[in-house]
Image (spheres, helix red, strand yellow):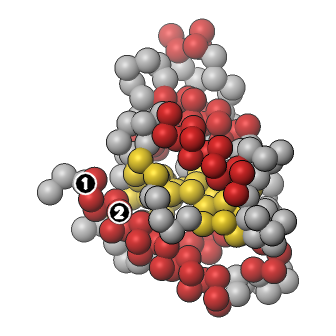
């Protein structure tokens, strides 16, 4: 079986480490996972007053979440939490009341940071928000990519050890997703 996995890149910078990681994941994923980016950079901030005529970017995001079997987040840590754009995307996809697209959705969080803790605090904040929204997050292994600059060969590819680790994580995520799909 093939699963469609939406990928949310938490940093909007074109050359961010989150983007570099996300761009590498496609080549590491098992054949049963098809990864597609879910864009969040153009989303208006959630405002319930706009629901009567939801902005096109909200509609696109909601469709992308709804048509994905699972969602993978690749996020940096910002001020011990998550980027505002990621929180906004979660909010948009959880509204309006009664139409929360996160309920029962398998998710995976990959956090990264320049420091040694690999986005630990940001990952916890994201997992808490996802749990509060009804998503089901892969509990183990947890992915904290510390000193992220050292995980790449300069401006080149990701180092082999990290590729191998992430390949294993993605294989585990495929198994996790299968547990929640109709048989």
**First of labels 2, 1 by sequence position:** 2
Q: Nearer the viewer, residue 95 or 43?
A: 95
Residue displayed at 58% across by 23% down: 55
Query: Which mark identifies residue 27?
Result: none
Q: Residues within 10 Å of mark 1 (few under 14, many from 20)?
A: few
Q: Residues within 10 Å of mark 2 (few under 14, many from 20)?
A: many
Quadrant of residue 125 in the image?
top right
Q: Nearer the viewer, residue 28 or 127?
A: 127
Q: CA distance from mark 2 to mark 1?
A: 9 Å
Say which element carries label 1.
loop
Q: Is residue 155 left or right of 97 when viewed as pictured?
A: right
Q: Quadrant of the N terminus?
A: bottom left
The residue that label 1 is drawn on is 181
Residue 63 in sight: no
> With respect to residue 178, does 155 lie above or below?
below
Q: Nearer the viewer, residue 156 or 57?
A: 156
Residue displayed at 60% across by 66% down: 143
> With respect to residue 42, does 178 lie above or below?
below
Residue displayed at 19% across by 52% down: 182
Place of residue 22 in the rendered image (x, y in percent of width and height, measured from the top left):
63, 66
Residue displayed at 81% across by 80% down: 150
Q: Is residue 28 left or right of 180 when viewed as pictured?
A: right
Say which element carries label 2.
helix
Quadrant of residue 109 in the image?
bottom right
The residue that label 2 is drawn on is 176
Residue 148 in sight: yes
């Amino acid at each position: 079986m093939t699963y469609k996995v939406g990928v949310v890149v938490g940093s909007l910078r074109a050359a961010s480490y989150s983007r570099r990681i996300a761009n590498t994941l496609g080549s590491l994923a098992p054949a049963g996972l098809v990864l597609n980016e879910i864009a969040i950079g153009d989303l208006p901030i959630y405002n319930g007053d706009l629901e009567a005529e939801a902005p096109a970017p909200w509609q696109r995001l909601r469709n992308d979440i709804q048509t994905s079997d699972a969602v993978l987040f690749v996020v940096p840590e910002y001020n011990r939490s998550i980027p505002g754009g990621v929180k906004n995307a979660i909010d948009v996809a959880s509204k309006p009341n009664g139409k929360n697209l996160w309920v029962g959705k398998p998710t995976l969080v990959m956090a990264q940071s320049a420091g040694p803790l690999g986005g630990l605090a940001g990952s916890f904040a994201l997992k808490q928000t996802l749990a509060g929204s009804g998503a089901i997050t892969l509990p183990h292994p947890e992915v904290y990519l510390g000193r992220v600059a050292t995980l790449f060969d300069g401006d080149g590819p990701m180092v082999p050890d990290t590729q191998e680790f992430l390949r294993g994580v993605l294989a585990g995520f495929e198994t996790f997703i299968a547990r929640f799909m109709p048989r």
